[in-house]
Image: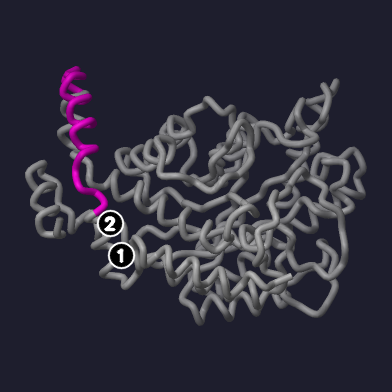
């Protein structure tokens, strides 16, 4: 089917495909750097993998240097239509120096800033509260040891300063997302003490003022993880309350809840109390295992909630998965494009007719509309979006991904 025929098919439902394509072109996805090297980072000083972060698999082609990672990113962006962002973790610094986490400065990231400017990519940032000897207890900002807490508070302050300078350099906002692994493997007896320490540490870390045009702080909750099965200090309720009280953004990671929870349902619930929402799109499989996202019902539901509730202007959408069993560059491309496809499908739905049916308690019409909509030629509209951006689809995409993987498979 040609685009014009598909456009007519949607027009019969009162849907303007050109308007949908124009809106989709304005939605950036923040691609996560840590998929490209299995969450190892580029610190020259050695640490340990404290915090329960791990990527499984040994597929050839892992990026070993900042230059290799940037080359892989360049390729991935060349396969994705639209203008997007890069989510950079603090332990991906690019320098010959060996600063500890509480010593990092903006200059340690200037190669990334220069690359982003050249590639017309905007940056986001994250403190790294894991993979360090001072995180081996699975405690950082809530650690009983004041010295360890002070170390991580200083790290967080420096990351906020770096993010603000990145924002000034790129002339816009940088999202600085704060996630800590703190928790307990077995049942604790003093949850309140740990949470009071986390709250006080966050208060100290967030105390320095920065231009909000350049820095948006976000806090990220989690249900559980390896080594913290019994209690995570920074739970959803903890961070939702903290974000409301302190007017930070709230990060909802799709892998950080019970597998049966509908994370899409949470968006409008928190949007009534929190101005800015950061979404980490992931696919949990039985737990927070961070699989590459599929174009499945959970992703479609998320996109529909964002679009139907008019939350696009308040959302920052990023990816968060790491799979070392497949081509890492292909994982990026598949993930971003699937999020874009879900958003496009949501933009192509008959919003007003569906809303009118629901308001009128006509649930039969609502169900009929949603089911008939699934048969419309969304793929043709997506192919048109890619063609206008000179991005491949179908066998051309598979061929390009396979060819690039062959060029990087010799990395040891």
Between residues 329 and 84, which one lies in front from this camera angle?
A: 329
Q: Residue at x 54, y 41 (%)?
A: 283
Where 330 falls versus 279 (above or below)?
Answer: below
Q: Residue at x 27, y 62 (%)?
A: 385
Where 195 falls versus 168 (above or below)?
Answer: above
Residue 109, percent from left and from top: 68, 74
* Quadrant occupied by the C terminus: bottom right
Give the numbered dot on residue 118.
none
Between residues 373 and 61, which one lies in front from this camera angle?
A: 61
Between residues 373 and 43, which one lies in front from this camera angle?
A: 373
Give the numbered dot on residue 386.
1
Give the numbered dot on residue 382.
2
Residue 87, percent from left and from top: 58, 61
Q: Answer whether labels 2 and 1 touch (C-beta < 8 Å).
A: yes
Q: Secondary structure at mark 2?
A: helix
Main SS, magenta region, reads: helix
Q: Secondary structure at mark 1?
A: helix
Residue 197, percent from left and from top: 80, 37
Q: Residue at x 83, y 70 (%)?
A: 44
Residue 267, percent from left and from top: 44, 36
């Amino acid at each position: 089917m040609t685009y014009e025929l598909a456009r007519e098919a949607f027009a019969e439902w009162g849907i303007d495909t050109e308007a949908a394509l124009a809106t989709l072109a304005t939605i950036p996805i923040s691609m996560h750097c840590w998929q490209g090297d299995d969450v190892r980072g580029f610190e020259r000083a050695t640490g340990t993998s404290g915090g329960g972060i791990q990527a499984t698999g040994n597929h050839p082609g892992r990026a070993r240097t900042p230059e290799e990672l940037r080359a892989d990113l360049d390729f991935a962006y060349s396969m994705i239509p639209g203008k997007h962002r890069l989510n950079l973790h603090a332990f991906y610094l690019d320098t010959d120096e060996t600063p500890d986490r509480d010593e990092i400065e903006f200059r340690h990231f200037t190669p990334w800033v220069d690359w982003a400017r050249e590639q017309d990519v905007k940056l986001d940032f994250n403190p790294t509260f894991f993979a360090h000897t001072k995180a081996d207890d699975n405690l950082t900002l809530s650690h009983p040891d004041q010295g360890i807490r002070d170390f991580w508070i200083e790290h967080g302050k420096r990351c906020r300063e770096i993010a603000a300078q990145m924002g000034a350099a790129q002339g816009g906002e940088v999202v600085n997302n704060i996630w800590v692994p703190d928790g307990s493997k077995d049942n604790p007896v003093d949850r309140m003490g740990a949470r009071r320490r986390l709250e006080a540490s966050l208060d100290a870390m967030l105390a320095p003022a920065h231009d909000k045009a350049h820095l948006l702080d976000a806090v990220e909750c989690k249900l559980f993880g390896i080594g913290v099965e019994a209690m995570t200090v920074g739970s959803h309720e903890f961070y939702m309350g903290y974000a409301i009280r302190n007017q930070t953004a709230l990060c909802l990671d799709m892998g950080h809840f019970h597998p049966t929870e509908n994370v899409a349902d949470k968006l409008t619930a928190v949007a009534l109390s929190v101005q800015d929402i950061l979404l980490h799109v992931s696919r949990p499989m039985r737990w927070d295992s961070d699989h590459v996202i599929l174009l499945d019902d959970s992703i479609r539901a998320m996109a529909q909630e964002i679009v139907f509730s008019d939350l696009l202007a308040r959302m920052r959408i990023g990816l968060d998965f790491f799979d070392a069993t497949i081509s890492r560059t292909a994982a990026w491309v598949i993930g971003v494009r699937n999020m874009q496809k879900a958003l496009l499908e949501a933009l192509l739905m008959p919003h007003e007719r569906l809303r009118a049916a629901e308001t009128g308690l006509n649930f039969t019409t609502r169900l009929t509309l949603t089911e008939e909509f699934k048969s419309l030629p969304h793929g043709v509209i997506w192919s048109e979006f890619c063609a206008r951006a000179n991005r491949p689809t179908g066998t051309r995409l598979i061929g390009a991904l396979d060819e690039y993987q062959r060029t990087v498979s010799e990395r040891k």
